[in-house]
Amino acid sequence: MLCATMKSFVFTVLTALVCPAWLAVAAPDAVTEPPVLSAAATQALPQLDQAAAPVAQGFTIFLIGDSTMANKPLIPANPERGWGQMLGIYFQAGVRVENHALNGRSSKSFRDEGHWATVRSRIKPGDWVIIQFGHNDEKEQDPTRYTTPGGTFNANLARYVAETRALGAFPLLATPVARRKFDVQGQPVNTHGDYVKAVREVAAAEKVPLLDLNQQSMDLLQRMGPEPSKRLYIYVSPGEYGALPKGRQDDTHFCTFGASRMCDLAVAEIQAKVPELAVFLNTRH
């Protein structure tokens, strides 16, 4: 008969052979759940950013603007994307992109509805804010959104710039991206009129880097031409998406490919004009 000590040794060896450590099941109190942001914290975040862990080190790029920049739902399948939805993947780890742009907002309504107050409460020194308005400031029949280029539109942009700087962050102004419209000669038409000029004026007066997305997207439309440029926007056949049973033809908002190309243009502008931010781009192969 084996002595008690030998029995204990054999049992230990057999247990290790039959039930190795990698098969062991942790006790219930050893199971850890993934961290979840509190309800109060998630309410301040854009929908697609609620699951993202906050950056302990590094900085945040905040986006404020309209539907052409905004996050769009992914499920159920949806053909529309905003260019700001793509921006985060262009940057290295430690750079957080928080997209607060919203459908239908102007430089006036974004503030009046309290969205800018939410962004301001989250800005830290060293963060960046990209400001892109114009599409909805043009809505002359809607006093809740309409602003005048050379007047209230300029004043609103300058105020966003000043308040961003007061928080120790860095503002960037972006001209509104182009709608798909061509004249009879096949040349792209600027549908934003003096609003583009106004953004350029404020950028120059306030000495803010300008991401001239209007010029860059107009140039892209010209290179592509009237028919091929439909690939940038939402041209959906009937029945292609359950959410759009009748299809859709939209020359303002972008499909996934178009949003990606607009984001390419924004990043190229950052590389050309904002070297202190461009150093954080994920340019490694």
Image: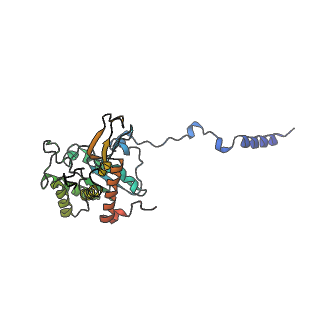
Q: In which quarter of the image is residue 281?
A: bottom left
Count every numbered label the image shows and give the total. 0
Residue pictured at 36% horizontal, 40% vertical: 78
Q: In which quarter of the image is residue 42?
A: top left
Visual colour scheme: rainbow
Residue pictured at 37% horizontal, 39% vertical: 39
Where is 15 relative to 265, above or below? above
The foreground one among 272 and 51 is 272
Residue pictured at 17% horizontal, 57% vertical: 198
Q: Quadrant of residue 245?
A: top left
Where is 248 relative to 84, above or below? above
Residue 86 lies left or right of residue 138; in this view the side is right
* Percent x, y of residue 148: 13, 51
Asked whether the viewer can see residue 207, the reply is yes
The foreground one among 248 and 138 is 248
* Percent x, y of residue 133: 22, 51
The foreground one among 13 and 178 is 178
The residue lying furthest to the front in this view is 185
Residue 27 lies left or right of residue 71; in this view the side is right
* Percent x, y of residue 48: 37, 44
Quadrant in which the N terminus appears? top right
* Percent x, y of residue 24: 64, 41
Asked whether the viewer can see residue 120, the reply is no
